[in-house]
Amino acid sequence: MNMDARTAYSIRCMENKDVPQSVALTDLMGWGLTEEDFAFNIGLEPGGCFVAVAEREQVVGVITSVAYGKVGWVGNVIVQPQKRHSGIGATLVNRALDHLTKKGVVTTGLYGYRNVVHFYEKLGFMVSRPFSWMSCKTVSWKGKAAPSGEPRDIQAIVELDKRCFGSPRQKLLRDLLTSPAAVTRVALDQGRLISFVMASKFDETVEIGPWASTQGREKEGLQLFRSLGEELSGLQAHVGVPSDRPDLIGFLSDLGFVEEFPVTRMYHGQPLSDMGCTMAMESLERG
C-alpha cells in the first residue's frame, strides 16, 4: 500500500472499521445505504470492496465490486466532495477492475449517473443501454396470487437469470432467496420456470429486482410483478428497469411509479448482448 504524496491518500481493501465512514460518505448523495448493505457486499465478494484513505484513516473514497464468473460489476463509487478531481475515483475504479480481472472477469458492468458517463468512458467503459430508477410512494396495487420461490427453485432461477444477465449469479441469488427480508414469486408452465421476481423488504421501503421473464412470456412477468402487491402493501417501492422498454415504463407508471433518476448501463471489456429477458436490475450496486 503506497501513499501518493501528491494527493495524500492510499487505496486498500475495505475493513469492518471502515463501514460507518463509508455509509456516512454515501449519505452525502442520499443513497440510503446501511452498514448491512456494505456487510452484504463484503460477504459476497471478499477482497473486492475498496476504500481510499487519507490522513488519520479518514475514508475519502469508496467502491464495491463483485465477480460472477466472467462478468463482474462495480458500484457505490463515491469520493468525498473536497477530494474530487484529484484522481481518486479513477484509481478506485482501476483497482476494482484489476481485482475482477484477476478473478477471471472479462466484462465489467456498472450503472452510471448520466453526469458521470464521460468519466467512465475515459476509463474504457462503453455505453450499453439506458435504465430508469423508479419509485412508488406507497404500494397499493393488487394482483392475482402467485407461487412463492422456494430453495428448490434456485437452480431454475439461476439458469433464467444467467440467460438474461450473461453469467451465473448463484451466491447472490441464493442469498437473496433465503434472506428473511426476501419476497420471491415465480411463474411456472408445466413445471418449467418462465419468470421470477425478487424483492428485499426493509422497515418502510422495498427494492424490487431482479425481475426476468423468458422471451415471449412478458405477460406472465407483468402478472408476477402485480402479485407482489399484497405482500408489499404500504411500503415505498423502488425498481430499476430498461427505459427503452415502453411496455415496462407504462406498466409501472400505471401502478404509481415515477422516475427518480436515469442511469446508463456501461460495460468495460467484452460487450454483452441483451437477450431481451431482463425486466429489472438486481440493484445499482450489483447488476
Image: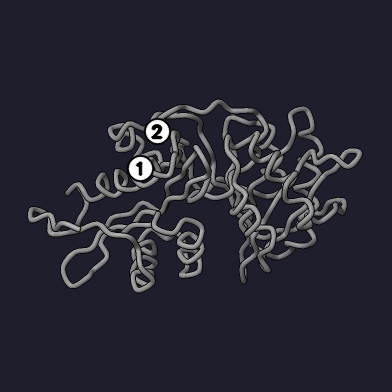
The amino acid beneath tag 1 is: Leu
For residue 270, above or below residue 150 = above
Q: Nearer the viewer, residue 157 or 101?
A: 101
Residue with the mark numbered 2: 268
Residue 172, disc: none
Q: Nearer the viewer, residue 251 or 231?
A: 231
Point 68% across, 69% down: residue: 180
Circles 2 and 1, Cβ within 8 Å, touching? The answer is yes
- Residue 195, quarter of the rendered image: top right
The quarter of the picture where the N terminus appears is: bottom left
Image mark count = 2
Q: Earlier in the sequence, mark 2 or mark 1?
A: 1
Residue 188 appears at what percent x and percent y? 85, 42
Helix, strand or loop at mark 2: strand
Point 18% across, 73% down: residue: 56
Q: What kind of colouring is applied to the model shown? A: one colour
For residue 108, above or below residue 38 = above
Q: Is residue 68 left or right of residue 2?
A: right
Residue 163 appears at what percent x and percent y? 65, 34
The amino acid beneath tag 2 is: His
Point 66% across, 39% down: residue: 279
10 Å neighbourhood of mark 1: few (<14), some, or many (≥20)?
many
Residue with the mark numbered 1: 97
Residue 174 appears at what percent x and percent y? 65, 56
Q: Nearer the viewer, residue 66 or 205?
A: 66
Q: Residue furthest left?
A: 5
**Mark closer to the observer (2, 1):** 1
Point 25% across, 61% down: residue: 60
Residue 36 appears at what percent x and percent y? 50, 69
Q: Is residue 41 left or right of residue 91?
A: right
Distance from label 2 to label 1 (Cα)? 9 Å
